[in-house]
Amino acid sequence: MLLPSAGRLSPYSDCTRPVASPSGYKTRANGVNIIRSAFLKGLEDVDHSPPQDFETIFLRHYAAVLRVVGGIVGDAAAAEDVTQETFLRLYRSPPQDHTHIRAWLYRVAANLAANHLRRERRRAYHEAVQTSYSRANEGVADVEDKVVQDDEAFRVRVALTKLSPRDRACLWLRYTGASYAEIAAALGIKRNAVGTVLARARAKFKDHYAKEGG
């Protein structure tokens, strides 16, 4: 099995479905407008002018970036934080050339997501060890299984971070229900190339996952 089922990723099940579904942040046009307004309001005291077309870029790409980040980090709140940090970096240090702005956003978001995963894995490991010790005398038989399941979920996400931003985005867009046409539009490739890109991304993921002990 290439990607685990939602059940096997239960610690992060809120992001194994399309990220647009949880209440709290809708990725439809109206919802993104609200997020954009709140984001810009939070920057009112920043002594920095926004890059050209920032609001247009935000509205056009926020939902796609959030969706992909949600799939990588596996937590709705963390996905929103990483996505907003991505656009904050765009606001503060935009690339000189906006021709490939989507690829730039994916690259920044993927790096931030990878950093988040590393921190989270360290934290979760220590928490799991503490939990196993604290419950050892309570006769809790499933603690070890829970630790193993959590570690498997992390191996999946670590393997994902080793893919290129495009491959990672392609996998998660498809996994969360995007059509070939939607993937093509999000990645800036032809629709008839999506199948090839997806197959190669799956093969690379499988290889990285195996090396992680999956």
Image: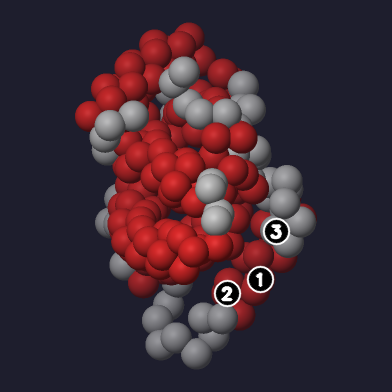
Q: Residue under circle 3? A: 25
* SS category of the residue bearing label 2: helix
Q: Quadrant of the C terminus?
A: top left
Q: Say left or right for 23 vs 1.
A: right
Bin the neighbour count of mark 2 within 10 Å (Cα to Cα): few under 14, some 14-19, many 20 and up.
some
Query: What residue is rendered at 56% in x and 81% in y?
Result: 42
Q: Is residue 7 above or below residue 91?
A: above
The picture places residue 81, in percent across and down from the top left corner, at 51, 65
Give amino acid for label 3: Tyr
Q: Is residue 67 visible?
A: no
**In the image, residue 71 lies at what x, y percent?**
51, 42
Which class describes the residues within 10 Å of circle 1: few (<14), some (14-19), or many (20+)?
few
Secondary structure found at label 3: loop
Report x, y in % for residue 32: 67, 57
The residue where tag 2 is placed is 40
| Left or right: residue 20 compared with residue 80 | right
- Which amino acid type is shown beneath numbered disc 2? Leu
The vertical placement of 41 against 10, above or below, is below
| Mark 2 vs mark 3, CA separation in Å | 16 Å
Q: Quadrant of residue 122?
A: bottom left
Q: Earlier in the sequence, mark 3 or mark 1?
A: 3
Q: Are the residues tagged 1 and 2 within 8 Å (C-beta)?
A: yes
| Mark 3–mark 1 distance (CA, rounded to whole Å) | 13 Å
Label 1 belongs to which residue?
37
Residue at image point 57% right, 74% down? 40
In this picture, residue 202 sits left or right of residue 41: left
Q: Residues within 10 Å of mark 3 (few under 14, many from 20)?
A: some
Q: Position of residue 180 (x, y in %)?
A: 56, 18
